[in-house]
């Protein structure tokens, strides 16, 4: 985008990046800028449907990603396009929205503009919904050795790393090397870690079982590390115990009360000893996007922006922060958790709030978070679900989990294709999306095939 | 794979990369090494099913790619996993085959070994099926400006480039810039060029029509350049004329008798003038993989290895070359064309030839090529098909084309998923795989979302 010139700037809150159509209308309509097309941002845009406003949604990617299923892309069960949809396509019919692809560089609160590359976009209302990224507890150098799973790019990259480990093991000359290549360590025993470890076990034990001649993928050593005393700490203890047993049956070694001391290219050091492993995956912690810096606002320890009961900045009622970027406390005094349903509820609340203000109303009811439950899938036919007082586990939980996730996929096309893919994998143990693509070790040698 | 140590080398033709299992058996079984898991290599492997041999299939990718549908990945209709399947999974049940992922660096005809990275793989029989890549007629510097479409990576990269052109146009400040970004030039009027140009037109005119606010994708200027007097020169002239009209109806400007003089970052110079265009795609020519150099063999002008009537090197009857890498002349004196059915037939013939020799028989019938016909699809409901004396065009040709391609997809899973995707696209004009992924302009800034 370097060829694109400097955008027009006006201080009226009505600039349109030089676009004539936008300028004409925008002089009259309030401008709402929403940063981030995740669950929070999309819910805000949808709640603003029909509002007489000029809405600009900005994301660095061209797609909305259904993060809860990213681990299935990383473990080759689904294709990227099954869990991510072009933002423009989702919002094509909502005529009051303009989607722009770009990255936030700064927010100028005095000028009421957001800097997107060389462009300045002014706003009357701003919704920051830029999510979170992995936190390495101050050890950002571990990122190179233990990638996390937040984006479609991450998933494609982890898929390549997982599959290449088996390819390299097939070619390796020594037992030590083979064993290191077939050792996988997932760090963090929350839902993502549990799902990743279970899926890697199924990939190795079932899908790849027949595919190699010199190694037996079923001997892969899959470890799940958790610093606390039990995995899935947000779930009741009996469900944690059930999940740990189910993982054990899949062949995952669950190591609780095990703290990571350092990660390197050949393994991980913990307070209980070292694991030699070619593949480390990080599912241990997240930190908010740098909205605290952009807004020069108060943040909590996790880097989240402190908002008031209306999800506004305390000193600026036209700037809202939602989802994983917000440190919100609901009316009962509980911190709103960093999960997809919370982001959706916050986005929806803020969208309605702004819509009401545009209509000239004033909403006075603060945000309340409705907790819908916790769930995690462990593998084929096995999951744990907690909904208020209902607890499910095993096959019935897995069916509930599958139906819930298919239901929440955005497009009917994805629902059909994902349902077929899952049924297929369930019946055959095949995983359809086992492609090694993207820049890996191989891509360095741009020679001919093979 | 740099951690993998140097492989054992023996001169007995029976080394197994240090693998003990392979060594034991291989001392007795003949070793057949097949380079390339394209149509030719896979057909050879399949023809060797049940043969008492130690077969090693080597490819730089982990997947077999169905190249005829790559343009649908490039234009966002299908996902990569719909048209590419892990080679290991296809051959998992064929126990006499070991699949290795690696790149050929050299072939040592005296030592009877192939050098794959740091590994030496010995052979008794060698099948070279490493395909072809784009030819820029001595102007390799054009590759950077006008990429071609041969691999899954190419398709993902072209998809990103196409979709980013619209994204950048939406942000552009000047009419000139917008117009340059919305101009697409496909160079080469063969089946791939026709299919690409038609698919880009449908993407712009239908799929993306509603998605932007500041540009109208329907105004995209799509050009198909052909140096010769007509597109699809392999088809009868009336089908060429029909295809040109069908492209015109889709909004593609077909420019025949137009020779490219040079490509650069901002457009293309031709002998009929310059086209300012942000996106150039190359479908004009191919050159064989460097097997002539590897084998120190005789080659033709297109870089293909000259083989005898049995597809062997004239001076070495245990080395075979098939597919786009071979300059083969069939019994009627016609050069075997560089198309998928020819590669399959050649691979199958060579596989049978080697199987017979392993059994101690000697096959004496030389290779004969059966031409099955020519076909190309132009867009929704439109294609041209020529089978011997039968000519089809329009909807009936399109249905034939669709059924033929679904039928030839390797796995039942892909057949089901591709059929659903196509039906969906046909009914709704939606394209499901419109994701911008991989390293592009954006990926340079590893900052937070959005």
Image: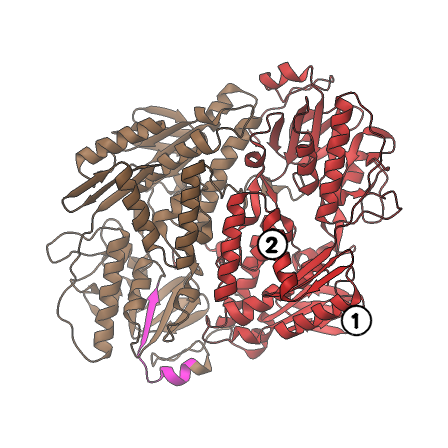
Chain colours: A brown, B red
Figure quadrant of the C terminus of chain A: top right
Q: Which mark is residue B403?
A: 2
Say which quarter of the image contains residue A253. Answer: top left
Which residue bears the numbered disc 1?
A: B271
State the residue in front, A253 or A309. A253
Say which quarter of the image contains residue A330. Answer: bottom left
Q: Does residue A41 belong to the magenta stretch?
A: no
Crowd band around label 2 with a 10 angstrom C-alpha radius: few (<14), some (14–19), many (20+)? few
Location of residue B415 with respect to A42 vertically, above or below: above
Location of residue B239 with respect to B59 vertically, above or below: below
Location of residue A430 with respect to B402 vertically, above or below: above
Q: Does residue A32 belong to the magenta stretch?
A: yes
Magenta residue span: A22-35
Residue A268 location, x and y as percent? 38, 30
Q: Earlier in the sequence, mark 1 or mark 2?
A: 1
Q: Residue furthest left?
A: A332
Circle 2 sits in a helix, a strand or a loop, which is it? helix
Q: Residue furthest front?
A: B390
* Residue pictured at 15% horizontal, 47% vertical: A388
* Chain to which the residue tagged by mark 1 belongs: B
* Residue pictured at 36% horizontal, 27% vertical: A251
Say which quarter of the image contains residue A65. Answer: bottom left
Circle 1 sits in a helix, a strand or a loop, which is it? loop
């Amino acid at each position: 985008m370097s060829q694109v010139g400097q955008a027009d700037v006006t201080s009226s809150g009505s600039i349109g990046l030089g676009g004539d159509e936008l300028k004409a209308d925008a002089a009259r309509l309030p401008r709402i800028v929403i940063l981030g097309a995740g669950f929070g941002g999309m819910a805000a845009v949808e709640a603003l449907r029909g509002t007489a406003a000029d809405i600009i949604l900005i994301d660095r990617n061209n797609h909305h990603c259904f993060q809860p299923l990213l681990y299935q892309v990383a473990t080759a069960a689904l294709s990227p396009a099954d869990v991510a949809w072009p933002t423009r396509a989702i919002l094509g019919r909502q005529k009051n929205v303009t989607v722009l692809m770009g990255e936030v560089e700064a927010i100028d609160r005095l000028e009421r503009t957001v800097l997107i590359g060389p462009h300045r976009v002014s706003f009357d209302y701003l919704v920051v919904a830029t999510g979170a990224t992995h936190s390495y507890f101050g050890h950002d150098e571990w990122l190179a050795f233990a990638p996390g799973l937040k984006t479609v790019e991450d998933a494609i990259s982890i898929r390549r790393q997982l599959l290449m480990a088996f390819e390299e093991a097939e070619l390796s000359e020594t037992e030590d090397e083979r064993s290191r290549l077939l050792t996988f360590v997932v760090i963090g025993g929350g839902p993502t870690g549990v799902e990743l470890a279970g899926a890697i076990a199924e990939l190795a034990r079932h899908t790849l079982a027949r595919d190699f001649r010199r190694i037996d993928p079923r001997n892969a050593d899959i470890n799940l590390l958790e610093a606390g005393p039990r995995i899935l700490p947000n779930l009741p203890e009996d469900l944690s115990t059930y999940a740990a047993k189910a993982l054990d049956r899949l062949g995952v070694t669950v190591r609780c009360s095990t703290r990571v001391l350092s990660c390197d290219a050949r393994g991980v050091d913990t307070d209980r000893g070292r694991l030699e492993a070619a593949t480390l995956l990080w599912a241990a912690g997240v930190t908010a996007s740098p909205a605290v810096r952009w807004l020069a606002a108060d943040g909590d320890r996790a880097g989240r922006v402190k908002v008031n009961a209306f999800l506004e900045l305390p000193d600026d009622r036209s700037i809202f922060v939602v989802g994983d970027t917000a440190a919100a406390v609901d009316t009962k005094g509980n911190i709103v958790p960093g999960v997809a349903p919370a982001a959706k509820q916050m986005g929806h609340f803020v969208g309605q709030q702004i819509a009401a203000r545009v209509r000239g109303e004033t909403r006075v009811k603060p945000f309340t978070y409705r907790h819908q439950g916790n769930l995690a899938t462990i593998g084929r036919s096995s999951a744990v679900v907690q909904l208020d007082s209902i607890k499910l586990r095993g096959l019935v939980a897995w069916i509930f989990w599958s139906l819930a996730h298919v239901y929440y996929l955005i497009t009917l096309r994805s629902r059909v294709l994902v349902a077929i893919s899952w049924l297929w994998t369930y019946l055959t143990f095949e995983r359809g999306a086992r492609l090694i693509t993207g820049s890996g070790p191989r891509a360095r040698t741009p020679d001919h095939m093979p």
